Image (cartoon, coloured by chain):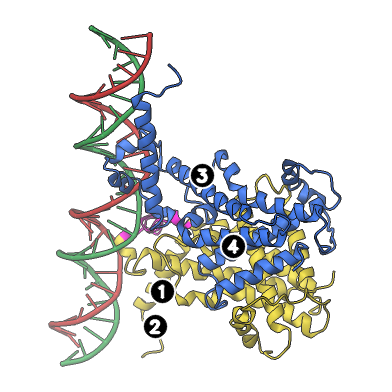
Chain colours: A blue, B yellow, C red, D green
Amino acid sequence: MPASKTARQRAREDITAEILAAARARLAEAGPGELSLRAVARDVGMVSSAVYRYYPSRNDLLTALLIAAYDELGEAAEAADDAVDDRDDHLGRWTAVCVATRAWSLTHPYDYALLYGSPVPGYAAPQDTVGPATRVIVRLVTIIVAAHQAGATSPVAPSIAPAGVEDAVADAIEFVRVLGNPEHADLPEITTRTIMAWTTIFGTLSFELFGHLVGSVSDYDAYFAQVISRLAADLGLPA
Amino acid sequence: MPASKTARQRAREDITAEILAAARARLAEAGPGELSLRAVARDVGMVSSAVYRYYPSRNDLLTALLIAAYDELGEAAEAADDAVDDRDDHLGRWTAVCVATRAWSLTHPYDYALLYGSPVPGYAAPQDTVGPATRVIVRLVTIIVAAHQAGATSPVAPSIAPAGVEDAVADAIEFVRVLGNPEHADLPEITTRTIMAWTTIFGTLSFELFGHLVGSVSDYDAYFAQVISRLAADLGLPA
DNA sequence: TCCTTGGCGAGAGCACCGCTCTCGTTTCGA
DNA sequence: TCGAAACGAGAGCGGTGCTCTCGCCAAGGA
């Protein structure tokens, strides 16, 4: 009977999820570097060596946390976009995704640090994480490309075209290819612009969360609103 | 005799510096989270408890590393700017500082992680670090403000002025005040723009160093050149 | 000059960590 | 039914940050 699960399989899945939940709870209160497998084991009432039956190493547990956090962030961003009634209000959708991204980051600072901070010592994110990791940027590119295809945009800044631009954006086009509309003259331009904008958003959040703006910015809400507003303008979204 | 140093004082300074040098050497090969005070002690031929005579805790040692790294980066950036002969070639100076920042970051990835990655667990950068930390951004603002004062710029993107902009840039004006020219109509505008550009540069470097661009960007050199070129255009520097 | 003070290095020790191995026990499946 | 696999517990290894105590020795005042 391959379809039905035995009691042991169900128990294994339950305990695996329980360990992950305990780890997530700990991550809500301390950074990824402080996450101790032994402490998680204590939380679920196990001895540390028993946890190794479910996660072969601390890094594997971190990977599971990474995927969960990426999915949660992607879910939040996509939900914020989907909640915009007027699908042609591209500025509204752009703003909603950016605001939702910041909101999630502020409420999950340690998850954010796990996703976008310096890699945990000796840890390299495996390939399973690239899918969930790109959900936000894929959605942003979707919105901006849709805006340009609808013609609801002002022209973006002219291409400067230094040496090697085509090389640099070559793989960026993959985003558009995945999204289904590979053939449009200025798509690489606008895709690269969107990636740059996403980079700016990430940098702004990192600076805010990691304390690099203390003394330079007083009102973070207003500053972030200004940043995403100007990025939207750079991307050709009319105000 | 308060002026001359006793042998003990000199020895203390030497050993303090020797420990710091050993820690920097270790940081060149592994991330900040992996930096072990005991390992550093072994490198300098001490027992671990002896190191505590010079650095009260591991965090204090990290702070010393932090300041040293910030200074080294600031030094590299300023030197690159100073090396530009034509002081009115603001685009050249901007590019030089950005390129030097990236070069230092690529050759000192773990130092970069210490400076701009997620804070080390349980570690909060003390106030002594803000001075060295702002050297690069201060120099960038200096260049851009000089360009605008010299009139050698095209107009920047018009201010969008959402609610709270003045609040947001209030402290940013401090940069300009420090630099000596507080009274100019669009200085807050251009200062905020410069901070945004610096944020983008930081985000780009973090993405590159922390591996968030694998699969999206193939030629990092060309991509970075494109980023700083477009940022320069956004800042009004003519091409 | 003596002698006290204080800085110094070494060592032991504490509590914690990731991880491995072994040992009974329980459960599944052939 | 019975062997194999999975499981939880425990001990143990080497590592960590940090504290405390112990002798040693130089610096400086009496």
Task: Check if mark 1 and mark 4 are on a common chain.
Answer: no
**Residue B75 is inside the magenta segment:** no
Instruction: State how far apart marks 2 and 1 are (Cα).
Output: 10 Å
Relative vertical location of residue B89 with respect to residue C16 in this rendering, above or below: below
- Asked if residue D12 lies left or right of residue A40, the reply is left
Amino acid marked by disc 3: Ile
Q: Is residue B104 visible to us here?
A: no
Task: Check if mark 2 and mark 4 are on a common chain.
Answer: no
Observer-nearest of A43 and D25: A43
**Residue B47 is inside the magenta segment:** yes
| Residue holding disc 2 | B5
| Residue holding disc 1 | B13
Report the magenta residues as a range: B32-48
Q: Determine the chain carrying the residue at label 2.
A: B
Q: Quadrant of residue A77?
A: bottom right
Observer-nearest of A69 and A129: A69
| Other-residue count near label 1 (Cα within 10 Å), few / some / many at <14 / 14–19 / ≥20 | few
x then y, percent, for residue B65? 48, 66
